[in-house]
Amino acid sequence: MSGRIGHEMPITRARLTYSLTEANAAFVAAMEDVLDVYTRPHDPARPLVCLDETSKQLVAESRTPEPMRPGQPARHDDGYKRNGTANL
């Protein structure tokens, strides 16, 4: 199964729009199976759980934050040290 998401050939189904620049029949069939899940009627016995993948940047403090003092909130520097990324 292969396909590349792009902006040339729009495919619209169940109020969701995707665009493919290259797709074989197996990819389109698999995508339609996934989109069909969203058109199923609500069934409390079979809840629909959606998970989106995302990439997050991992950062650390570059300076030690100054703790709270009477009458002043804690202070954090806006500088940071980059520690790579993680896919969730």
Image (cartoon, rainbow, N blue to C red):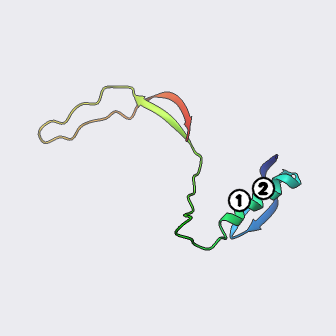
Q: Is residue 75 above or below residue 5?
A: above
Residue 85 in which image quadrant: top right
Q: Report the residue at 19% width, 36% height from top.
A: 68
Mark 1 residue type: Val
Q: Residue furthest right?
A: 25
Compute the Cα span from label 2 to label 1. 6 Å
Q: How many labels, in total?
A: 2
Categorize mark 1 by other alpha carbons within 10 Å: few (<14), some (14-19), many (20+). Answer: few
Q: Residue furthest front?
A: 45
Q: Position of residue 35 (x, y in %)?
A: 71, 63
Q: Report the residue at 77% width, 62% height from top.
A: 32
Check disc 2 and report the residue beneath it. Answer: 30
- Indicate the secondary structure of the residue bearing disc 1: helix
Q: Relative to the observer, which residue lies in front, 19 or 25?
A: 25
Indicate left or right for 77 with 54 as reference.
left
- Indicate the secondary structure of the residue bearing disc 2: helix
Categorize mark 2 by other alpha carbons within 10 Å: few (<14), some (14-19), many (20+). Answer: few
Q: On the rendered image, what quadrant is the C terminus found in?
A: top right
> Which circle marks residue 34 in the picture?
1
Q: Relative to the observer, which residue lies in front, 11 or 24?
A: 24
Q: Report the residue at 57% width, 52% height from top.
A: 51
Q: Is residue 57 above or below residue 63?
A: below
Q: Position of residue 54 (x, y in %)?
A: 58, 45
Q: Position of residue 45 (x, y in %)?
A: 53, 67
Determine contact: label 2, label 1, CB under 8 Å: yes
Mark 2 residue type: Ala
The answer to whether residue 8 is seen in the rendering is no
The answer to whether residue 30 is seen in the rendering is yes
Q: Residue furthest left?
A: 70
Q: Report the residue at 88% width, 55% height from top.
A: 25
